[in-house]
Amino acid sequence: MFKKKGVLASAALALGMMATATAHADGKPLKSIGITVGSLGNPYLVTVVKGAEARAKQINPDAKVTSVSAEYDLNKQFTQMDNFISAHVDMILLNSADPKAIEPAVMRARAAGIVVVAVDVASAGANATVQTNNLQAGQLACEYIVKKLNGKGNVIIENGPQVSSIVDRVSACKAVLAKNPGIKVLSDDQDGKASREGGMNAMQGYLTRYPRIDAVFAINDPQALGSDLAAKQLRRKDLFITSVDGAPEIETALKSPDSLIQASSSQDPYTMAQQAVTIGYDIMNGKPPAQAMTLMPSTLVTRDNVGNYKGWTAPR
């Protein structure tokens, strides 16, 4: 079911791009885009930037695309937003460090006539948002845990930065686990920093603190990979890990018998960013979307189906 939705979403995106190119041939030009993301050390967000740049160049081969990393620092992101405003960009793609606190910067940009599209996480005040259905992603990953444990076991929810996407994943995971009284959640509030290092540090703490852990839900693939490494270092093989992203490195991990990672709910950051630019360009030309929030479907990638998974690096 989810795969079919993904195909339809891709087809709709392709048609939307053609329609946009035709409709706005004589409309307001796209000359420049500013992109600020949580961290350019995250391969997922690097792919977001690549997708946005590719779509911008389709609209205008001479479009200038500037991408910067906020390092999940709100003050740094405020400065970046103000710099984009001073540069008079036409559009800002915003992957916010703090979805609510960033609103004053968003409103300054909009007051300056700049379209702001939130990508991957919602941002207060943005013209539109494009993100994965993160409730679905968290649900799929944690339903896998419940099924594999037959509804009984000790589970860790390895949390992360409190942006909307992660909050939704964790919320959906908790809801799934709560339906199973045989599942005991040992921890659900530690911030793994959305990074490999953060996931490794968090996992080292869990493994030291808890003698028995059956499964871990990490909020993204970098944390899952770090957690996997920590478990290997401490020679713990009596658990498994699920996550969210469907990144290339997770494809490799799922194919490796030595990895504890067994499932990841997919995202498509490249297509997501393309959709965000398309929607932003439509808004620039007086055609806002029917719905301010665009949700992209997630599918569960496992050891059983990874061979058929069309991931981030699939031909476009």
Image (cartoon, rainbow, N blue to C red):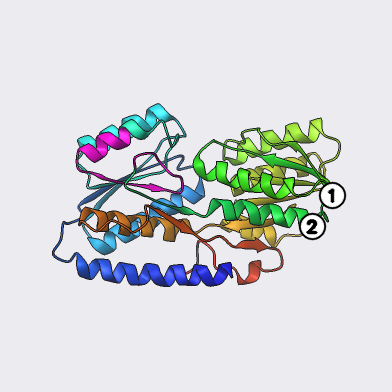
- Relative placement, left or right, of 278 versus 233 is left
- Relative placement, left or right, of 140 versus 45 is right
Residue 104 position in % (x across, y down):
32, 31
Local SS, label 1: loop
Residue 19 position in % (x across, y down):
27, 70
User: What residue type is disc 1 on?
Assistant: Lys
Residue 259 seen in this snapshot = no
- Relative placement, left or right, of 314 versus 289 is right
Q: Are marks 2 and 1 in contact (CB under 8 Å)?
A: no
User: What residue type is disc 2 on?
Assistant: Lys
**Foreground pick, 40 / 157:** 157
**Quarter occupied by the N terminus:** bottom right
Spatial CA span between label 2 and label 1: 9 Å
- Quadrant of the image occupied by residue 310: bottom right
- Relative placement, left or right, of 199 versus 33 is right
Magenta highlight on residue 248? no
Q: Is residue 104 above or below residue 258?
A: above
Q: Can you name the residue that lies furthest to the top here?
A: 75
Give the crowd class for mark 1: few <14, some 14-19, many >=20 residues within 10 Å. some
Magenta highlight on residue 122? yes
Residue 7 position in % (x across, y down):
49, 72
Q: Residue, x 86% and y 36% (percent of image)? A: 211
> Which residues are the magenta region?
105-125
Residue that mark 1 sits on: 152
**Foreground pick, 227 / 213:** 213
Number of numbered discs visible in the structure rendering: 2
Local SS, label 2: helix
